[in-house]
Image (cartoon, helix red, strand yellow):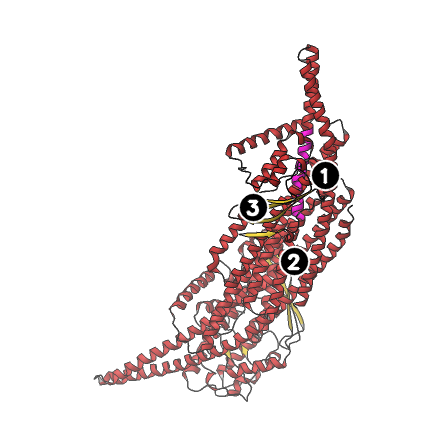
């Protein structure tokens, strides 16, 4: 239905990634079909791993999810914050509205219809741009991560120009996932109870828990606020067209009034972009950070359990070697996770602060710009 | 105002006398006299009008009549008025000696204003600068329980000599307003004047106030009603004819007003009104009028369209008000949430910035609230008023149709009687013939009079409607322009505030390191 060039859409969330020449990934094009979106992933790299220096492949959402899951399931990456998976492209609401518009075509005037159609198409386009940006951010985060970028699956994802034939999870697998999550959250509660020796991690744990909850709340409230704003903007549009048909004023007045509407809609859209998306992204990131901490705590518990098992084995003088090796493994795993986790969490904070700063500044600037234009427009229309 | 002491019978018989006789007022000068003293003794009919009119007005007749070129007297109580089909109040136009008086004076109740008198009013309008301002304020709860009501203070400030003083105020309750409207409607609607409709009753709203709930919604309700009453009175007095109506003057000036009982929602009069309305609706469907005047057809179509558009616009504005209120609530909630987030953030600069954001959003929420109120009070209420006004306009057009119908009916009847007369010529019962012939002749004369009257009424109402419609349109355009300008001004203010807030926030955001 529609296609996009990369330089036209703004990045929803800037995660301040260092783009170095060794590996640069972006989504250069996207095509929206009936019920799926096809992303053209474009890679430029000087790494020897790849056959060429520059190449593109076409990927779908499910393949992104496959890649993400492969990271999560990889034990070696237990010590890293896995970049959160991009959300599924959701055009249902927009498509429904377009359909309703088509059905109601007979009941409104031609101008109204074309106007509403334009608006819905703009909305569709905005959602489209957003989902492309989300997918791109995911890939860029992976590419920027010193360890993850070397992952084999990632290279396959980037280079293999055939369909990865990754099917979406069927019902059975989804059910398995659901149970896995239940177990994990129960476990998480248990593990969280374990007091950490390390102050840094203890502090991070409490902080992240609280932060995650508040970000969730803020994200939900900002969504609601923006929705109200969009509703109000829609109303203003309808009023403008009614005024126009009333014709008590000359058409210039009404055109200006319509302008205020368009601006209101833009304000709502920009707020959406800068504020809501930021919060949503950090909701997911903070969840990923929490997951990291959980994994670390889990490995700590395992380490402590292995210690206990070793003591028991030594006391019974049975399977001591086995217990020793397992204990050493756990210890090694735990230390490895702790080390990388510390760095990851510090990076997380830096990224977070930078992203918030950028988005808040841009939000304020956009709001100012719109308010000034609106004021000008209304002054002129008097 | 509905003084039962003034019995309708004496008045109507007076007029009957005049109607039957071919002569009109013997002395045209008689009707021009302003004070009771100057009425000639021999003219009993006018005399009966004089003293009666005197006692109706508390103030000095001299003053009143000096200004007015016509006067109105109310003779029948409200109840009768509601029951009767046509109007019963009589109007005696007082015209200066120079203008022609003749045919319409002394004729039956239907004929109210004449061409010349209306013209005179317009002339006077030009000379007298329209200077009257009415304020409705200080709603006060009087009484307790289900018998409680809100009393409003109606203050009039004016320089018109129509009134005794420059500034005065009275206490009125809602049913008084409704009473005024129904009196005016019964007097003027059927002859083509667009009487502004009164604010609507609201049983739910009033019950809440009576019960004594002192909360946001009942305060809003009272404020809504107060503002609607003010607009209603201003619109009524802006109408040059209605301004001079004694009911209006009494309403504005006299400290005591008899209770208008038939305005109660569940009274017998209320039920009767509903029945009448239903009957009217049926009638409208059955009357097929040959519209000879394209102007009327065009105007009727125009008002139909306007009605539809205004209703749509009104619905959109109400929806906007609702959404803005929602937006303000949601913004407040988001502000709180952002403050919490700022609290838990451990990077100090970011934390401060988030708290600032929360504050900004809180202020914005207040702005949205104010904007919603502006939307509502300026825009939405005005549209509601106009939707109701258009209904009144359509009613006036319907009355014209009814007048036409009446005229046609009398014509038909006349036709029949003439045929009967002709038939009589050919019967061979000579003894009864003469008597029957005389009877028929009388009836025919009567009917001829009625037909002429009907035609005149129809022309009169058509003329009145033309003037009223053009006045209405002028007012409407003026009203809308004023409101739109006010609304846009409020928008500009909001934007300026927004700019201030975001400009304050920007450096904080930039300070995050």
What's drawn in magenta, residue-wise?
A: A275-296
For marks 3 and 1, give the CA distance: 30 Å
What residue occupies the far bottom of the structure in this picture?
B98
Name the main secondary structure of what is drawn in magenta: helix
Whether B362 is drawn above or below B421: the answer is above
Other-residue count near label 2 (Cα within 10 Å), few / some / many at <14 / 14–19 / ≥20: many
Q: Chain of mark 3?
A: A
Whether B220 is drawn above or below A142: the answer is below
As rendered, which of B5 and A344 lies closer to the eye? A344
Q: Which residue is mark 3?
A: A38
Q: Looking at the rendered structure, which numbered label has been put on residue B371?
A: 2
* Residue A19 pos. (x, y %): 71, 44
For marks 3 and 2, give the CA distance: 44 Å
Disc 2 vs disc 1: Cβ atoms closer than 8 Å?
no
Question: What's the residue at 65%, 64% (across, down)?
Answer: B488
* Residue B106 pos. (x, y %): 46, 82
- Element on which disc 3 rests: strand
* Residue A21 pos. (x, y %): 71, 44
Respond whether the residues carrying marks 2 and 1 are from the same subunit: no
- Element on which disc 2 rests: helix
Disc 3 vs disc 1: Cβ atoms closer than 8 Å?
no
Image quadrant in which the C terminus of chain A is located? bottom right
Compare marks 3 and 1 and give the one earlier in the sequence: 3
Other-residue count near label 3 (Cα within 10 Å), few / some / many at <14 / 14–19 / ≥20: some
As rendered, which of B276 and A364 lies closer to the eye? A364
Q: Which residue is mark 1?
A: A348
Residue B127 in view of the camera: yes
* Residue A55 pos. (x, y %): 62, 45
Determine the image quadrant of residue A48: top right
């Amino acid at each position: 239905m529609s296609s996009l060039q990369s330089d036209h859409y703004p990045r929803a969330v800037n995660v301040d990634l260092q783009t170095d020449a060794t590996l640069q990934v972006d989504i250069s094009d996207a095509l929206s079909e009936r019920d799926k979106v096809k992303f053209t992933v474009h890679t430029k790299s000087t790494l020897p791993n790849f056959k060429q220096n520059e190449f593109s492949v076409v990927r779908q959402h499910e393949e992104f999810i496959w890649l993400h899951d492969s990271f999560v399931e990889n034990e070696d990456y237990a010590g890293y914050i896995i970049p959160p998976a991009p959300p599924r492209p959701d055009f249902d609401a927009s498509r429904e509205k377009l359909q309703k518009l088509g059905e109601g075509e007979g009941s409104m005037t031609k101008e109204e219809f074309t106007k509403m159609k334009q608006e819905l198409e703009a909305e569709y386009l905005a959602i489209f741009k957003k989902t492309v940006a989300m997918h791109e951010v995911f890939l860029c985060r992976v590419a920027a991560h010193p360890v993850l970028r070397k992952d084999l699956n990632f290279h396959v994802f980037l280079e293999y120009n055939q369909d990865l034939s990754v099917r979406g999870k069927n019902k059975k697998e989804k059910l398995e996932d659901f149970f896995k999550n239940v177990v994990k959250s129960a476990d998480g509660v248990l593990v969280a109870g374990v007091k950490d020796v390390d102050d840094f991690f203890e502090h991070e744990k409490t902080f992240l828990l609280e932060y995650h909850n508040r970000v969730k709340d803020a994200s939900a409230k900002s969504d609601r606020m923006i929705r109200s704003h969009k509703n109000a903007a829609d109303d203003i549009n309808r009023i403008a067209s009614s005024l126009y048909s009333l014709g008590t004023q000359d058409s210039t007045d009404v055109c200006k009034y319509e302008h205020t509407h368009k601006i209101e809609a833009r304000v709502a859209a920009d707020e959406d972009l800068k504020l809501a998306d930021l919060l949503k992204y950090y909701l997911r990131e903070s969840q990923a950070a929490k997951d990291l901490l959980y994994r670390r705590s889990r490995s700590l518990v395992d380490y402590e359990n292995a210690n206990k098992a070793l003591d028991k084995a030594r006391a019974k003088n049975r399977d001591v070697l086995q217990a020793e090796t397992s204990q050493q493994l756990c210890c090694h795993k735990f230390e490895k996770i702790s080390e990388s986790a510390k760095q990851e969490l510090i990076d997380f904070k830096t990224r977070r602060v930078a992203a918030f700063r950028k988005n808040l500044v841009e939000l304020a600037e956009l709001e100012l710009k719109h308010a000034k234009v609106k004021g000008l427009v209304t002054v002129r229309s008097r | 105002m509905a003084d039962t002491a003034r019995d309708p019978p004496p008045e109507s018989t007076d007029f009957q006398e005049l109607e039957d006789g071919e002569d009109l007022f013997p002395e045209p000068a008689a009707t021009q006299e302003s004070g009771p003293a100057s009425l000639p003794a021999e003219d009993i009919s006018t005399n009966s009008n004089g003293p009666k009119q005197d006692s109706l007005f508390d103030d000095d007749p001299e003053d009143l009549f000096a200004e007015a070129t016509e006067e109105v007297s109310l003779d029948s109580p409200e109840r009768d008025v509601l029951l009767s089909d046509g109007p019963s109040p009589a109007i005696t136009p007082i015209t200066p000696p120079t203008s022609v008086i003749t045919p319409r004076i002394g004729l039956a109740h239907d004929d109210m204003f004449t061409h010349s008198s209306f013209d005179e009013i317009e002339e006077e309008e030009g000379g007298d600068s329209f200077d009257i301002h009415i304020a409705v304020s200080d709603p006060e709860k009087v009484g307790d329980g289900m018998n409680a009501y809100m009393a409003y203070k109606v203050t009039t400030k004016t320089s018109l000599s129509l009134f005794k003083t420059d500034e005065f105020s009275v206490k009125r309750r809602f049913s008084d307003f409704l009473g005024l409207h129904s009196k005016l409607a019964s007097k003027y609607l059927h002859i083509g004047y667009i009487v502004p409709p009164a604010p609507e009753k609201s049983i739910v709203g009033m019950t809440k106030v009576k019960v004594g709930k002192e909360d946001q919604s009942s305060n809003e309700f009272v404020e809504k009603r107060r503002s609607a009453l003010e607009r209603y009175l201003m619109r009524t007095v802006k109408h040059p004819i209605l301004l001079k109506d004694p009911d209006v003057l009494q309403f504005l000036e006299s400290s005591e007003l008899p209770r208008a009982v038939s305005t109660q929602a569940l009274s017998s009069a209320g039920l009767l009104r509903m029945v009448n309305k239903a009957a009217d609706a049926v009638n409208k469907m059955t009357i097929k009028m040959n519209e000879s005047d394209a102007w009327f057809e065009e105007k009727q179509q125009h008002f139909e369209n306007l009605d539809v558009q205004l209703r749509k616009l009104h619905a959109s504005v109400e929806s906007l008000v609702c959404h803005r209120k929602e937006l303000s609530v949601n913004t407040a909630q988001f502000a709180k949430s952002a403050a919490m987030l700022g609290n838990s953030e451990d990077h100090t600069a970011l934390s401060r910035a988030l708290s600032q954001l929360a504050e900004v959003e809180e202020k914005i929420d207040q702005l949205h609230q104010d904007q919603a109120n502006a939307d509502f009070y300026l825009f939405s209420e005005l549209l509601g008023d106009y939707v109701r006004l258009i209904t009144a306009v359509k009613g006036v057009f319907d009355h014209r149709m009814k007048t036409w119908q009446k005229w046609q009916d009398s014509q038909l009847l006349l036709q029949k009687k003439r045929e009967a007369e002709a038939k009589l010529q050919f019967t061979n019962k000579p003894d009864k013939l003469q008597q029957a012939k005389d009877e028929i002749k009388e009836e025919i004369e009567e009917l001829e009079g009625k037909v002429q009257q009907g035609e005149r009424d129809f022309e009169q109402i058509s003329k009145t409607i033309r003037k009223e419609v053009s006045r209405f349109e002028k007012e409407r355009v003026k009203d809308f322009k004023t409101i739109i300008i006010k609304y846009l001004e409020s928008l500009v203010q909001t934007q300026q505030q927004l700019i201030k807030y975001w400009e304050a926030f920007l450096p904080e955001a930039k300070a995050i390191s």
